[in-house]
Each structure stands twice: as structure tokens, then as C-alpha cells.
Image: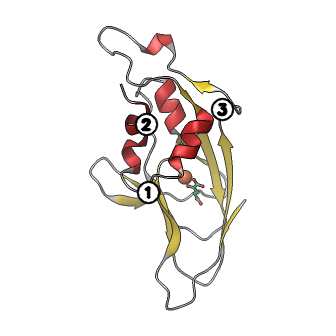
Amino acid sequence: MIKYTAPAKEEPAVGLSEHTDINYLTILCQNEVQGLKIITKEGEWIPVDPGNDYFVVFVGESLKAWSNGRLHPPLHQVVFRGLKDRLTCAVFLKPKPGQVVNTAPEFVSYDHPRLYKPFSYGEFHEYSKTVFTDRVNILKNYAGI
Ligand SMILES: O=C(O)CCC(=O)C(=O)O
Ligand SMILES: [Fe+2]
């Protein structure tokens, strides 16, 4: 469970800066305080509002690596204002400690060569904590061939 404390009235919107998740999959639901946004291919930030009766599921960078770039992790952020705290319930599906993330051979072919080197999830996780810009290219910059 993640709690975002409501900003004081005059404060600007607060939340989580833009990023892609680095794990395999993220499953999200939230309380009634909206704030999650994703960026479209055209570069427009649009709200994604997990409702009461459904979840939002995001592909993460590790699934992008496994699928040789076929699955797309959306760049997202959290921006909100208001008087109520925002609560998100997030389930992060990720590799086991020490596991190497590798591309499935079925996704590699002559026409679609391997895009990423195998990497230790733990080391990628540590690296991700040092990256504050160009988060959209984090996998390419870390493990790209
Ligand atoms: O609070 C949310 O809705 C999203 C949280 C999130 O993106 C994250 O923890 O990676
Ligand atoms: Fe996220």
C-alpha cells in the first residue's frame, strides 16, 4: 500500500515523478483520489483512473526484455491536488532475488534480432535508483545491444 499525503492547499501537485516500472508486471488499484497519468505515443499525458471494480496492469521493463521489446512499459507519473490522501494498492511481480532476466528464444529471429543482454534483476534495480532522467530509455541504456 502506498500513501500520498494530501498537499497543503497552496502547494503544487505532488506525487511520483515520471518513470517506467522495472519489474515484470504491476497491478494497481486506488482510492477515489485520482492522480495516475500515462503518456501517449503522441506525447500527451492522460489520466488513468483505476476504478472500484477493475485494476490497472502495467508491463514493466523486465517483461520488455523477456519479449525482446515487443511489450511496451508505459511511462507514468502521479500528480494530484486536493484535501484527501491518495492510497494505492500496488502488486509488483518481479524476478526472484538473484534471477537473471533473459529474452525468451521464441522472440529472437533473423528479422528481429536480440535487443538486450541478459542482466541480473538486482543489479538493474540498483542501477534504476540512480537514473533520474531519460527513464523511458532505461532498459536500452542499461542492457541494450
Ligand atoms: O500510485 C500509483 O498509482 C502508481 C505507483 C507507481 O507507479 C509505482 O509505485 O511504481
Ligand atoms: Fe510505477
Residue type of the residue flagged with mark 2: Tyr
Q: Nearer the viewer, residue 75 or 100?
A: 100
| Residues under numbered marks 2 and 1 in contact, where contact means CB atoms less than 8 Å apart | no
Question: In front: 95, or 39?
Answer: 95
The image shows residue 61, relative to residue 47, as above or below, that is above
Residue 118: give x, y in percent of width and height: 51, 23
- In primary-sequence order, the first of circles 2 and 3 is 3
Amino acid identity at mark 3: Pro
In contact (CB < 8 Å): disc 3 and disc 1: no
Disc 2 to disc 3, C-alpha distance: 17 Å
Q: Which label was assigned to residue 95?
A: 3
Residue at horizontal 55 percent and vertical 68 percent from the top = 34
From the viewer's perspective, is the residue at label 2 or at label 3 nearer?
2
How far apart in space, not on screen, are marks 2 and 1 (Cα)?
A: 14 Å
Badge 1 element: loop
Which circle marks residue 142 in the picture?
A: 2
Q: Nearer the viewer, mark 3 or mark 1?
A: 1
Circle 1 residue = 132
Q: Position of residue 121 (x, y in %)?
A: 60, 34
Mark with earlier residue (2, 1): 1
